[in-house]
Image (cartoon, rainbow, N blue to C red):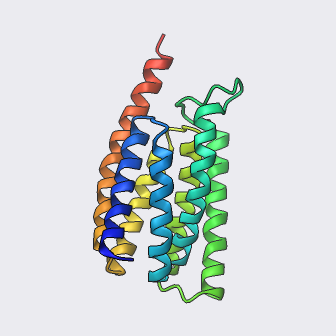
Amino acid sequence: MTKSSKMIATTCGLLNIFLITRQSNWNFLFGFLNAAAFFFLFHHKKIYADMGLHFCYMAFQVYGFYQWRLGGTLHQGVHVKYANVRDFSMALAVMALLAGTLVYILSHYTDSTRIGLDATSSAICLVAQWMMSKKWIQNWWLWLIADVIAITLYLYKGLYLTSGLYTVYIIMCCIGLYQWHRKWHLATAP
């Protein structure tokens, strides 16, 4: 992947997160482009769980767009809310199962060089992406954790521009968390 391709992926990633914090449906277009570019980058760098993760992100962009536009019980789109304890607990259980499965697959079937970081960050991101598609506010906390893990992995792999992008993602996650919580609070205030 050329330097200009990395810049395009980085720009699309920044636009994607910015638009998510604003709850704009345009985020899905930039999310798809970002995921496609990083899919090829991670294949080249042999970070296979992240490569597969970005393939899933492409599918999640379609799913998320549908949820935001036509999801919910009245098919008028989903609204920002906190996941209830049962749903959030189930999401965490799925995340643990995914991480364990990815560790097994990566250790037995690939030449991945950072299996634990790769698998853990990928599992967290998959669940966070699904939660974001449902507009569950807790998705931002998972993204913060995943971003810290990803930065560690990308620095190790020499992906400094990508590490910088994920550092900006941390800042944008804090903004998104604040904005989504504020919107939820205003919508539920008596």
Picture coordinates of residue 100 (x, y %)? Answer: 64, 71
Q: Quadrant of residue 24?
A: top left
Picture coordinates of residue 163 (x, y %)? Answer: 32, 67
Q: Is residue 42 above or below residue 140?
A: below
Any part of residue 173 in sight: no
The residue closer to the viewer here, 138 or 131, is 131
The residue shown at (66%, 42%) is: 87
The residue closer to the viewer here, 149 or 176, is 176
Picture coordinates of residue 111 (x, y %)? Answer: 55, 89
Q: Is residue 64 above or below residue 106?
A: above
Quadrant containing the N terminus in the rendered view: bottom left
Q: 71 left or right of 113?
A: right
Q: 1 left or right of 81?
A: left
Q: Is residue 138 above or below residue 99?
A: above
Picture coordinates of residue 68 (x, y %)? Answer: 58, 35
Any part of residue 134 in sight: yes
The residue shown at (39%, 55%) is: 13
The residue shown at (55%, 51%) is: 129
